[in-house]
Image (cartoon, rainbow, N blue to C red):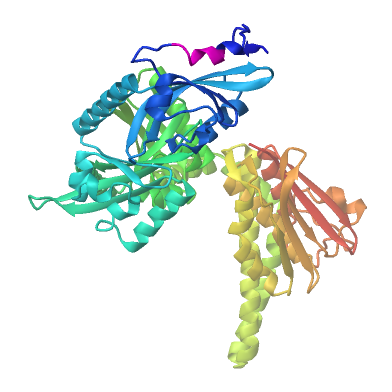
Amino acid sequence: MNLKNTLNYSYFDLDIINKFETLEEFPNTKPILLSNSNGLILYANNTGRIKHNFKAGHNLFDLFSEPDLQTLFGNLIQNKISSFCTDLILKDDNDYYEGYLLNLERVILNDEEIFIVFIDSQDNRTRLTSRVNNYNQALEAVNVGVMLADKNGCIHYLSTSFEQFLRIKIEDVYSKKISKAFQKHLSNQELESLQIAIELKKNWVKVTSDIASEGEIIYKEIRLSAVKDNIDKSYSYIITANDITEHIEQARLLKRSEQRQKSIINNISDPILIIRKEKNNLIFENANESFYKNILARKNEIKSEFNLQEIVSPEFFKIINNEISNLISKERVHAQFHYTAISNKRYLGKITFTDDSYDLTRLFIINLTDITEQLEIERKLRDAYNKEINLNKLKSTFLANMSHEIRTPLNAIVGYSDLLEDDVKAKNYESSSQMTGYLKEGVSRLLKLVDNIVEVSLLDSGNEEIVLAPMEINKIIKSNKDVWQELAKSKKLQLVYNLSPEEITIVACEEKLDRAVKEIMDNAIKYSLEKGRIIISTSVNKDKGCIEIIDDGIGIENSSMEKIFHLFEQVEESGYTRSYEGAGLGLSLANKLISYMNGELKIASTINKGTTVKVLLPQN
């Protein structure tokens, strides 16, 4: 029969064990046992037999211990651990609990696992007492109340500060449930949530208030933490009561300070934004009401700690990020930039910074001044100057190409004026009302014609400045829905919108793109048959943003397609005909505007079936 140690593989004769009982022992020898994996005691030395009544044939697992020896043996075998040391609590015949130091060694004897058990009471008791005293001193020094409970949720330790907070003694709640100690401090609903947390082995937090002896209100944070034992997989509980009165008072002072600061910046009419830079991120700190209203176009406030990129538009973030990077790299004290908001207001932005000595961070303050009116005045002066320079060119273009288109509505106005005069003299008021409508129609046609002439002339002269910027493609469609619906109403047309659910950002001039799309839609409505349908959709087409307008109108013959983009031309009777009003500028103007924005206008049409117009613009 051989004894094989799992660590050094040495061998012993089992018969030697039988001779151990005949040997004498010193009085202070530690209790030593041999046990198999089922807890059966194979051998106990004299100290173990006398002190703990350990005898061969008895079972260790029958002892009341903490941790449970059967569970402990099982975990050691399962985890293939050969040596282990832990604290052990045993209950004696008088139902007293004593603490010991337990050492286990696993060996294999004739292919059977054997446990060598050492129980050291004196050293363990001293060490345990010292540890508890140290813990008590440490806990009392930091003035944090601590309660310890076993796996059943029964209290077995309570610090002095916790006793003072609960106004109870340890003997009042020892071995009782945790909720018993809080009956005077928590409501029934709170006690129920505490019990549920214990049963589910979850953490739990509650802030309570109380009146101190001096009459002041104190606040305590009660926190329950479930702690898992990695050996026997059981849970115990630590409950702490921490005085957070000072923290709450500081939070109130900070809140009042923030409210005063917000009140000050909210009284400033210019949009104000405060951010800070953390590593490579810009973090939102604060903003006034004007910033929410004019820049973000929203009423609800945003909490701090948000990344600025998640809050503002991509264009605004790109500008701010670049300017702050330049500010830091070039060691400047301020930076300026221009920005156009969603409302089309133009702002002059100024970035300055201040260092916060409290948390050693740098705050960047962005002030935005509305210069829309100033720029508008400058634009008008500039336009007037440019128009004066190009007056001769515009005059010659007008006279050369528009004599017929101007004469037609003017002749109509003169004719209807004569008829109106006759109706007034004859008191034929019903007919005169109809004549007035015709007059308005002729004037409107003439006015639109003049607007288009001016736009085309400016583009051809090269004096029209088109500023390109990132924009969301669906915005153009949504902003014109109501106008198009009103125009389509007279012909009972159905407008169908298939807009992309995903954001498509293109590079374009919002004003010019809006003008171009309006011209295309005007043609689609004009040349659609009554009760027809027009489909407006947005999508991505070969890495380009696409606006597609499909009508089921009269269509265009292939032979007439090349005339569409010629100034002042309409196709003949087989297509978009002279029986419809217009100078033939609409699609030509749209094509020019889109070309100036590095885009492309494509048209496909079938006679008597309809026309498809695609606007393709580069993505951002």
Name the residue located 23 percent from the left edge and 41 percent from the top edge: 247
Q: Is residue 22 magenta?
A: yes
Work out whether residue 127 or residue 458 is closer to the camera in this orientation and state it: 127
Does residue 564 sit above or below 46 in this rendering?
below
What's drawn in magenta, residue-wise? 17-23
Q: Is residue 94 visible?
A: yes
Q: Please tell me in which quadrant of the rendered image residue 427 appears.
A: bottom right
Q: Is residue 500 left or right of residue 385?
A: right
Q: Residue furthest bottom?
A: 427
Q: Residue furthest front?
A: 22
Work out whether residue 146 or residue 318 is closer to the camera in this orientation and state it: 146
Q: Is residue 360 left or right of residue 501?
A: left
Does residue 591 sit above or below 411 in this rendering?
above
Q: Is residue 267 magenta?
A: no
Name the residue located 85 percent from the left edge and 51 percent from the top edge: 604
On-image quarter of the N terminus:
top right
Q: Is residue 523 left or right of residue 294?
A: right
Q: Is residue 299 visible?
A: no
On-image quarter of the C terminus:
top right
Work out whether residue 259 or residue 470 is closer to the camera in this orientation and state it: 259
Query: Residue 616, how many percent across, how many down?
Result: 73, 43
Q: Residue furthest left?
A: 214
Does residue 620 sit above or below 610 in this rendering?
above
Q: Please tell me in which quadrant of the rendered image residue 279 appears.
A: top left
Query: Residue 168, how many percent across, how many down?
Result: 20, 50
Name the residue located 42 percent from the left edge and 20 percent from the top edge: 46
Q: How many marks?
A: 0
Does residue 416 sit above or below 391 in this rendering?
below
Query: Residue 586, how many percent across, how many down?
Result: 71, 54
Query: Residue 447, how many percent across, how many down?
Result: 61, 62
Work out whether residue 571 or residue 602 is closer to the camera in this orientation and state it: 602
